[in-house]
Amino acid sequence: MKPHERIILDFDASNLDSAPIYSLRDYVGLIRVSSLMQHLEMARLFRCRTQNALGSWLGKILALEKVIHPRKVFLDLRLNLDPGGMSEVVKALSRLNVEIISVHTLRLESVASAVASKGATMVFGDILCEGMDEEACMERFQSSRETQTFYSAELLLKANANGIVCALDEARFLRGLRRFDPLLVACQIGPEDDLREAVGIGIDYVVLDGKAYGTIGSLQERAKEVRLGLIDKERAYHVP
């Protein structure tokens, strides 16, 4: 991949119409679209996609995919469905030529169903303790954040998923364990984070806020940082 193709620009699905997506599409690898819709409602919309409901959220995604071009969309939906429902939704998404979709890593059977139905689309999973501090993770799961991160990554490996969506500290932990090298890592990078260092430790996709970095000049500068990070990574792997 070229450096800019490792950049995922993040936009809220409810604000697609006013987002400057079309002018920026050649300076990033993917456009990330997330949604707070209930999963059952999403499933219903995907099942009726042939009705061409352009006024719906799904219609916006269909329109977005056509205007950008195929394989430019990352639907970060964290799908949490039973295996049968997961298969149906993921098959519909794969027909839209979506590059990446995300699923919830709670059940191995559901993740495996997504992988079996994905076609050319890549399936990424999340971390169960995402957004929690150590105390909250211990209270909910009776285990540490590192343990839950390991568990989620292990489940994704068993399901033959393509990658994982996680925070920067979780990515550092995973990249320190060579057993998870087969998983691609997508990580949200904020203004306070060192993008070059993140790529240097092995993060494959950096997710940037469309509001903070939504200009051509800013994205070109971020691509330069990605390129330097890739050089650092190459040097680190070839230290005598």
Image (cartoon, rainbow, N blue to C red):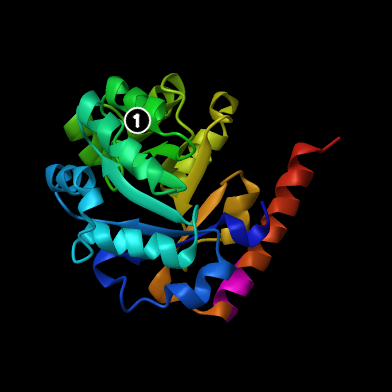
Q: Quadrant of residue 87?
A: top left
Q: Is residue 233 left or right of residue 220?
A: right
Which type of secondary structure does the marked residue at label 1 adopt? helix
Q: Residue, x 57% and y 33% (percent of image)?
A: 176
Q: Quadrant of residue 13?
A: bottom left
Residue 80, position in %: x, y? 22, 36
Where does the image place residue 173, in percent across and percent down from the top left? Answer: 49, 36
Indicate whether 50 appears above or below 13. Answer: above
Q: Residue at x 63, y 59 (%)?
A: 196
Instruction: Point out residue 204 in the picture as x, y percentages from the top left corner.
Output: 57, 47
Magenta range is 217-222
Q: Which SS type dominates the magenta stretch?
A: helix
Choose between 193 and 216: the one closer to the eye.
216
Residue drawn at (34%, 50%) of the image: 76
Q: How many discs appear?
A: 1
Q: From where the camera sits, is residue 197 visible?
A: yes
* Residue at numbered disc 1: 114
Side of 188 where 110 appears, left or right: left
Query: Around disc 1, counting alpha carbons within 10 Å, would you say few (fewer than 14), some (14 to 19), or many (20 or more)?
Result: many
As drawn, is 154 to the left or to the right of 216?
Answer: left
- x and y, in percent, of residue 7 in the image: 54, 59
Residue located at (41% from left, 34% from top): 118
Q: Quadrant of residue 153?
A: top left
